[in-house]
């Protein structure tokens, strides 16, 4: 698995996908344009995330999970696997609860240093999720979505999608994969950075084990007990709020490959792959579960035959959507963050396009949110708005395709 510089003049889509695009974020991004970066302002620039579009406020609680059944595969002598997840849920409006930062302080500093971004210029984005807010009571429990990020990215990297789903009545669990995720901060303050060996199949296997263990712990959460290593009370109302009979797994890039393999788990009803390839045997026995491919510009079966290998083995509802003029990071928070970073970091227009394409950021976010929500509404709630069956004039950047 090669680790190319995303800012190279000729990006390999296949290697781009194999590294989840942000393998390049593990190396300095600025190159010769660094001299053009902005000087430090009097006050750091606060990066912003777009508002969710639904009617429900958002709550969030982080959990530190420990799997005693397997050793950490990358730290010899550690007989267990530790990782972090966050549970995002519809909440009561509680302005007194603090909004969660996009990354915790040590992880944010590591992110800036790892990407050669100016430490004194940028302030961490704040999410719209209120830490520990009470769960909004509903007549029925909320469908559950599990999210796995791309290689080198964190569980918060698709907050624009996660918060939007929550605001429309989903409960979303985001999963970090230490040594694979970019920077994972644990409750004691230590940070684990990406350093996974060059083996896509092994990486997917590691991620699958993390997600499966998370699925194993969700009944504990639904019973009102905290499975976190540190324990402590869960947000009020979280007990009974999860509909564990309606679970989907979604992921970006390498996380999308993970979601495809998890269709084999009987607890998973549907999956979605946001611009990822497929590594390892693609469900050789096939699956009748619904699956969505949401692909960036140029990601097709000619460049990535694994898409077709999976497509022909999907016997239930399947859909593929191409996002015109997009980049690999258009399915993440970086669609909106990269334009904000461009000035302070000294990015050129060509560099910005290498990250997120030339699609208008607001249109990209609106389109990805709408089609992902349409798929989950259809497969977990049996509500069909027609977006995945025919072109929509409301979303001209989305093209339905066959793989």
Image: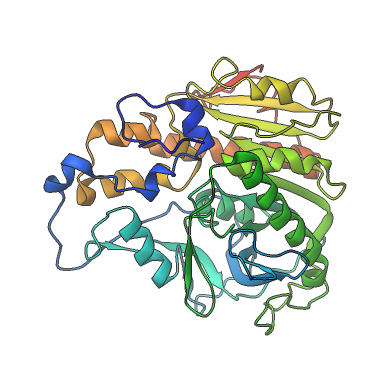
Left or right, 22 with reference to 10: right
Image quadrant containing the C terminus: top right
Left or right, 156 with reference to 5: right
Where does the image place residue 292, in percent across and percent down from the top left?
68, 32
Residue at image point 62% right, 58% down: 175
Where does the image place residue 195, in percent across and percent down from the top left?
49, 54
- The answer to whether residue 274 is above or below residue 160 is above
Q: Nearer the viewer, residue 223 or 393?
A: 223
- The answer to whether residue 110 is above or below residue 390 is below
Q: Nearer the viewer, residue 328 or 303?
A: 303
- The answer to whether residue 23 is above or below residue 101 is above
Colour mode of the rendering: rainbow
Where does the image place residue 107, in percent across and percent down from the top left?
42, 66
Residue 151 in sight: yes
Where does the image place residue 337, in percent across and percent down from the top left?
36, 48
Residue 47 in sight: no
Q: Quadrant of residue 361?
A: top left
Q: Nearer the viewer, residue 158 or 56?
A: 158
Q: Residue furthest bottom?
A: 232
Left or right, 145 with reference to 360: right
Residue at image point 73% right, 77% down: 226
Residue at image point 79% right, 32% down: 283
Residue at image point 47% right, 77% down: 189
- The answer to whether residue 290 is above or below residue 38 is above
């Amino acid at each position: 698995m090669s680790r190319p510089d995303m800012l190279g003049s000729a990006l390999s889509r296949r290697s781009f996908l194999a590294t989840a695009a942000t393998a390049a974020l593990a190396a300095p991004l600025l190159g010769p344009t660094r001299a053009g970066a902005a000087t430090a302002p009097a006050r750091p620039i606060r990066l912003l995330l777009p508002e969710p579009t639904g009617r429900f406020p958002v709550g969030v609680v982080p959990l530190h999970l420990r799997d005693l059944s397997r050793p950490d595969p990358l730290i010899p002598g550690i007989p267990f696997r530790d990782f972090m997840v966050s549970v995002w849920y519809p909440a009561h409006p509680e302005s007194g609860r603090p909004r969660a930062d996009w990354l915790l302080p040590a992880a944010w500093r590591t992110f800036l240093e790892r990407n050669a971004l100016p430490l004194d210029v940028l302030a961490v984005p704040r999410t719209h999720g209120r830490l520990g807010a009470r769960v909004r009571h509903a007549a029925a429990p909320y469908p559950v979505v599990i999210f796995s990020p791309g290689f080198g990215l964190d569980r918060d990297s698709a907050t624009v999608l996660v918060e939007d789903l929550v605001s429309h009545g989903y409960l979303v669990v985001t999963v970090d994969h230490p040594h694979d995720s970019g920077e994972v901060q644990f409750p004691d303050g230590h940070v684990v950075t990406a350093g996974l060996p060059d083996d896509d199949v092994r990486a997917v296997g590691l991620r699958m084990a993390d997600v499966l263990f998370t699925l194993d712990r969700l009944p504990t959460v639904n019973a009102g007990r905290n499975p976190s290593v540190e324990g402590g009370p869960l947000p009020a109302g979280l007990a009974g709020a999860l509909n564990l009979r309606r679970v989907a797994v979604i992921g970006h890039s390498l996380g999308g490959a993970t979601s495809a393999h998890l269709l084999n788990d009987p607890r998973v009803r549907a999956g979605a792959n946001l611009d990822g390839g497929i590594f390892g045997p693609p469900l050789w026995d096939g699956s009748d579960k619904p699956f969505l491919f949401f692909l960036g510009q140029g990601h097709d079966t000619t460049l990535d035959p694994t898409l077709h290998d999976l497509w022909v083995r999907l016997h239930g509802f399947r859909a593929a959507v191409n996002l015109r003029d997009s980049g690999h990071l258009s399915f993440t928070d970086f669609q909106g963050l990269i334009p904000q970073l461009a000035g302070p970091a000294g990015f050129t227009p060509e560099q910005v396009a290498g990250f997120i394409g030339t699609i208008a950021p607001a249109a990209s976010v609106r389109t990805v949110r709408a089609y992902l929500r349409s798929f989950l509404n259809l497969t977990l709630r049996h509500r069909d708005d027609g977006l995945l069956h025919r072109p929509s004039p409301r979303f001209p950047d989305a093209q339905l395709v066959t793989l």
